[in-house]
Image (cartoon, rainbow, N blue to C red):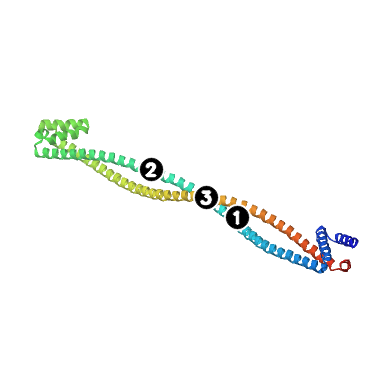
Amino acid sequence: RRCATSLLARRSCAYSATMRCAIFLAGVAAVQLETQMNANPIRRVVSMLQSMQKKVEKEAEEEEALFAKFECSCDTSTKELTASVADEKQQIDDLSTAIETDSAQKKQVDEELVKHNAERDEANKVVAEATSLRKKENKDFESESADLKANLDAMKKAVAAIEKGTSSAFLQTTDGAALLKAVSGAADDDKETITEYFQQGSQGAGSDEIVGILKTMVEEMSDRLAEIEKAEAEAAANFAGLSSAKSKEIEAATQAIEDKTARTGELAVKIATDSNDLKSVQGALAADESYLEELTKDCAEKKKLYEEAKQTRADEVVAIADTIKILNSDDALELF
């Protein structure tokens, strides 16, 4: 019997792998034990192996179910992380483009601000210079106009005095002093003739000559007064036009400065916000890519281990099945 057992064991070992051989030898040992106890050895061992086979198959199913859940979790997490990485990369592209665009726009707005400030400063400078010049021109006009009017008044009174025959006493009056001042700018001959006439009265040059000289001077001074009044009016109108135009320029420049100051401030805030968001998204992307790499590696390792365990259990099931087959064979029946 031991020789037959040894022969059957060798056949089994030659037929199956080491695991099958071990299970078979265990089965043979169980049969021998059952035989010694006068029991039904083959059926009992076969029943035991069948129970073992069911247990192994059940554990395999449970492991498969657990692995399916794990694999589903891996797939879901991988898809979510992959989508998150893609979204973060898109956000980085969008934010980078926005920052670049806004920075270029801010640079342009800042340059325009400098230009508007320069234009406003220049307009204010022109107005200030024009105002200063206008004041000087007006002052000169007022001075010359007052002198001309005073001189004209004195000359007209002198003509009236001559015509009334009271010229001898005229120089003693305030108007006489004004006349001497008025003729001080005349030609030397005319000035001397007029002065002598009023000093000597009718004994000097003829009154008609003096009246003629004075009337000529009145006419010239009247023309000069009209000339400077016209020039003053034109200068005042030109200044008013210039002031109005420059005021509009200053107003427009000021509005542009206010608008673009606000705009450059908005752009600066947006650039700062987008820059902070960019750093945050870049950090999130780095974390997600790192986690995705670890997850992919971990899932692959777990899958490899599961496949190895699955193959091991499959080998166990086959070995048990082969052992049951051997124990149910005619050789086993003859042996026991």
Mark closest to the chain's N terminus, 3 or 1: 1
Badge 3, how many Cα within 10 Å: few under 14, some, many 20+?
many
**Mark 1: amino acid:** Val
Mark closest to the chain's N terminus, 1 or 2: 1
**Is residue 253 placed above or below 49 in the rendered structure?**
above
Element under disc 3: helix
The answer to whether the residues at label 2 and label 3 have Cβ atoms under 8 Å apart is: no
Given residues 280 and 167, the one toward you in this image is 280
Badge 1, how many Cα within 10 Å: few under 14, some, many 20+?
many
Mark 2 highlights which residue? Answer: 121
**Mark 3: amino acid:** Ile
Quadrant containing the N terminus is bottom right
Q: CA distance from mark 3 to mark 1?
A: 21 Å
Rendering quarter of residue 300 = bottom right
Rendering quarter of residue 69 = bottom right
Mark closest to the chain's N terminus, 2 or 3: 3
- On the picture, is 165 further left or further right than 133? left
The answer to whether the residues at label 3 and label 1 have Cβ atoms under 8 Å apart is: no
Given residues 171 and 67, the one toward you in this image is 67
Residue at point 23% right, 41% down?
Answer: 225
The circle on residue 99 is 3
